[in-house]
Amino acid sequence: MRKRRNSPDVARRNFLKGAGLVGAAALTPVAAAKAQVAAPKADLKAAAPGPRQVALETQPPAKDPVTQTSSGGDFMVDVIKTLDIDYCAINCASSYRGIHEAMINHGGNVKPEILTCTHEEIAVHMAQGYAKLAGKPMLMMCHGVVGLQHAAMGIYNAWCDRVPVFVMIGNITEADKRGPGAEWQHSAIDPGALVREFVKWDDQPASLQHFAESAVRAYKIATTLPMAPVLLSLDAELQENPIADRESLRIPKLAKVVPPQADSGAIAELAKMLVAAESPVLVCDRLSRTGAGMKHLVELAETLQCAVVDNGGRMNFPTRHPLNQTFNRSVLTQADLVLGLETKDLWAAVNSFTDRIERTSRPTAKKGVKLASLGTPDLLIKSNYQEFARYQEVDLAAAGDGEASLPALIEAVKRLIDPGRKSAYEARGKKLAGQQLAARERFRSDATAGWDSSPISVPRMCMEIYAQIKDEDWSLVGTSTGNNWPRMLWDMDKPHRWNGGSGGGGVGYTLPGSLGAALANKPHGRLTLAIGGDGDFMFAPGTLWTAAHHRIPMLYVVLNNRAYHQEYMYVEAMAGRHMRGVSNAHIGTTLTDPYIDYATVAKGFGVHGEGPISDPNELAPALKRAIAAVKSGQPALVDVVSEPR
């Protein structure tokens, strides 16, 4: 029989007795001796128990949540373990302490394993970068409304990027269960309302069975195309209290949804349009979900010998393929057919826009050009946040997953090609190959400008990095906004060579997003690297501690131009437009006085640090040392003082 716990009154008396002993020990020896003489001897014989005491000691103990052996959180972890989730990124907090404790003790900190992050936005962005290379979601948990507010930018980036992130937050739903102070400030009736416009689905389960069904549903929704983040709000009592009737609970089976293919009639019509066109162009963005996406796109392009423009939302097409015309705008102005494949902004392919004098736009496509789309962007649009881009009318819109629909489109195209067309296609392909070769030579020539200058030019930095990694199985998983030099200069020939961008253009993605991708690359032994701006780095420098703590190897190169240079140039443009001069453009846009030493910051987090490096001749040795550290299993950072980009 378990012994009855002391009542508060008994515990208080025991505490005071202990306090008295401590007080006696503090007396002088003489005073202590007098106290011993004065104190009466204790009667060591116990009194016989009375009827009330006997009754209390023989009754079964009351249910005590402090000593309970299971919790609702245990069942929640059992549910999560049936889903294909390897990691859970968190910034720890009290509102989900129940499921947190269950993960590490009941679940053994395995599937999912907890990743400790110093900020909620780091946790979400890690999940975003991870999902794009791992092909499956990571779980992310955060604290009530305040943790969700911190996480919101990361969730929005993942929404714009159409990436599945599984978010769980803690909440104390019932008002009478909230403690005074923070638990009121950190709870809400409907916390999901904060992010509802940029998640695909959310729910607040009211029971453990409700949780089981909603968790499986959420995973299914997140991973069904078009993919996007989902959120569950978990009541603290539901996590922490004992399970009333475990035998009545059931975990539903997860049935993953097969990616939908476009309508066969639409595929046949697209094939006719492609085969008949004299200068078709394929514009892709988030087409390649798996390695099959690149393979199928290469086959379609080579079958037609047509131009491909890769907007870079994913690694869609080899950068040095003869048909790659990504940086050749003329193919779009001369095209008689433009087909968007999972393209989020087809309008931008056939129009130009400027905001330098006034915000104006004009069509750039050839008159009479036919436009078509194949993909899922139209299947997930909300109203408030305008990430869906400007409306572009098309001649044919085929709804369906682009990657899954390509095999059928390829077969339909092949059936329509006769020998006469094949010879015309070959001539077209040779012309495009010549243009691609000329573009590569131009890129190399442009890269030599300012080759020996200090600060280091961005092209020199990119080529120095590539010289060190080109013989490795490398993966570039993050770059600063607008930095196209790697895609212009490097041979990106495999699906994992590139991981796309942030999705929503939110500053602060590159470092944590790259670390998540590095975690996905780790089992494959790939050399993971990223090039991030200094301003972006400062949003989430604590990411480096997570990298060191969890021993995730990654080379991170800080493109350190000591300013938010895009905004610097915008202020210059505005000042010029208003005839006010540009001498004050540095105010609010530069990171100087003092300069930030990112290598020292990295070392403080336990990461190998090199720099700051402003002499281009010192860059290669520093990169070699950093890569050696990465190969040994460490994260490493190289601080490169660079020119404005």
Image: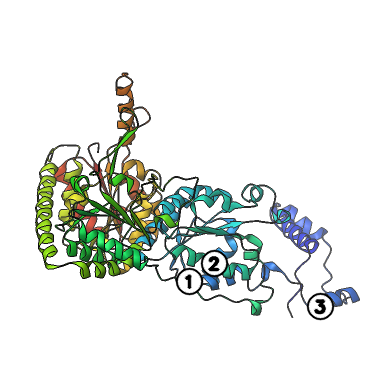
Residue nearest the observer in this picture, 401 or 245: 401
- x and y percent of residue 436 in the render? 13, 52
Residue position for label 3? 59
Q: Tell which tag, 1 or 3, sits nearer the viewer.
A: 1
Q: Is residue 101 left or right of residue 33?
A: left
Q: How many C-alpha atoms fall within 10 Å of the one at disc 2: few (<14), some, or many (≥20)? A: many
Q: CA distance from mark 1 to mark 3?
A: 43 Å
Q: Is residue 515 left or right of residue 433?
A: right
- For the point 36% across and 27% down, the residue is 587
Q: Quadrant of the N terminus?
A: bottom right
- For the point 35% across and 68% down, the residue is 264
| Residue at the far right in the pictured view | 51
Q: CA distance from mark 1 to mark 2?
A: 9 Å
Q: Which mark is residue 83?
A: 1
Q: Is residue 12 visible?
A: yes
Q: What amino acid is found at the position of numbered circle 1 in the picture?
A: Leu
- x and y percent of residue 576 in the render? 29, 23
Residue position for label 2? 215
Q: Earlier in the sequence, mark 1 or mark 2?
A: 1
Q: Is residue 622 visible?
A: no
Q: Is residue 16 left or right of residue 314?
A: right
Mark 1 and mark 2 in contact? Answer it, CB < 8 Å: yes
